[in-house]
Amino acid sequence: MDRRSLFVASCFALVVTSLSFGIRAGILNDLQGHFALTDSQISTIAATAFWGFPISMVIGGMLVDRLGMKPMMYLAFLMHLGGILLTIFANGYMSLFLSTLMIGLGNGMVEAVCNPLVASIYPENKTTKLNHFHLWFPGGIVLGTLISFVFTNLGLDWQAQMGTMLLPLAIYGYLFSKTEFPVTERVKSGVSEADMYKNLFQPLFLFMMICMLGTAITELFTGQYIDVLLHSVSENAILILFISSGVMTLGRGLAEGVVKTLKPTGMLLGSAVVSTLGLYLLATQDGGMLFVSAAVFGLGVTFFWPTMIGFVAENLPNTGAVGLSVMGAAGMFAVSLYMQAMGGYYEGLVGDMNDVEAGRTVLRTTLFMPIVLSAAFAGLYVYMRKRNAA
């Protein structure tokens, strides 16, 4: 087993996942205009990726121990390929809906396999390596938004932008086909499948799963919908996503020192507090301060997703691959529901106020998420200090 090759291949797979978010965030307005879609329809299309994601994450998490990681990655490859091609050749709302669903299914399968894979090949350094792996999510969004911005200014259409995803897709498909996979950590340690499912009902796991709903909405809803919400505030609203994702990429690359200094619970508490400030600034600032706000928000959400996964992998290892998948699936499912609700809410607001105030109102409404998380993670910080001292 060559763990470096496995890690590199996993990163390319995550690049495809993140490109789908970054490029789609940049082309939502183009899709809406080209196919004459309503605000509710475009929000449903955006949310569909978040439906497919949890479905395949849960199914993948349940099957990865039985079928092995390699067949599951082949399935992710086929889902990605089909979704990309169907988007490129879309002819209306339904084809866009189905293509986004397929890409979401592929994205979820990548997470279902690669999270336990990284935890298995780096058992001594789980949270740090999961942060390094997940830096390619905002990193890919940086690439995706840059591609969308440059291609749009060059007059290249959204089909060409989606086509760029085929290159990292081919790379990860090739690398995984040449590499041997390990068994998952749960199988290696001899924990039974029954015990794995039983551990999902531990109070600490249930608490973390509930918190995952808020961390995912704070990070992913804001990022995926930012161009729609703030395009009336700034002509280059997609650059807000570019800046916040760039900060996240850099932060996750430097995660090792942060993990050693703050520990996962300190990272989560700090992230909640800073993301509260960042989201407030995005909802209230304009001009150059809007881009400063994006950097603050990006710093706030930097460690949310990988540290939540890493905390469970380190402190609740007997939940196995299913535990990691349930965490991600819960987060993505919450985002899909919230995105649909906010799409309708935004559409209703536009009838009563201008686009600027409507977008800012949606962001202010979302502000309660990181505020509640700040209190929850403060409690977790105190609890884990007492448990570790015992």
Image (cartoon, rainbow, N blue to C red):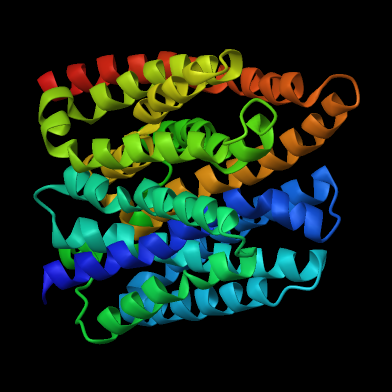
Most distant residue in the bottom direction: 178
Q: Taking 331 as reference, is 72 left or right?
A: left
Q: Nearer the viewer, residue 24 or 111?
A: 24
The answer to which of 80 and 288 lies nearer the viewer is 288
Q: In this picture, is 287 found above or below 223?
A: above
**Image location of residue 352, percent across then percent down:** 90, 20
Residue located 87% across and 29% down the image: 348
As drawn, the residue found furthest toward the right would be 351
State the quadrant of the C terminus. Answer: top left
Q: What x and y, as percent, mark residue 126?
A: 18, 48
Is residue 200 positioned above or below 346 on the image? below
Q: Nearer the viewer, residue 7 or 289?
A: 289
Is 252 on the left or on the right of 275, as rendered?
Answer: left
> Looking at the picture, does residue 69 appear above or below residue 239?
below
- Report the number of discs: 0
At which x and y percent is residue 174? 30, 84
Say if residue 360 shows up in the picture.
Answer: yes
Query: Which quadrant is home to the N terminus?
Result: bottom left
**151 displayed left or right of 167:** right
Image coords of residue 23 (percent x, y) = 54, 56
Q: Residue at x 45, y 78 (%)?
A: 77
Please tell me in which quadrant of the rendered image residue 154 appears.
Answer: bottom right
Q: Is residue 29 above or below residue 247?
A: below
Query: Can residue 372 be seen in the rendering of this structure?
Result: no
Residue drawn 67% across the image and 37% down it: 338
Q: Residue at the spot x=63%, y=55% of the render? A: 51
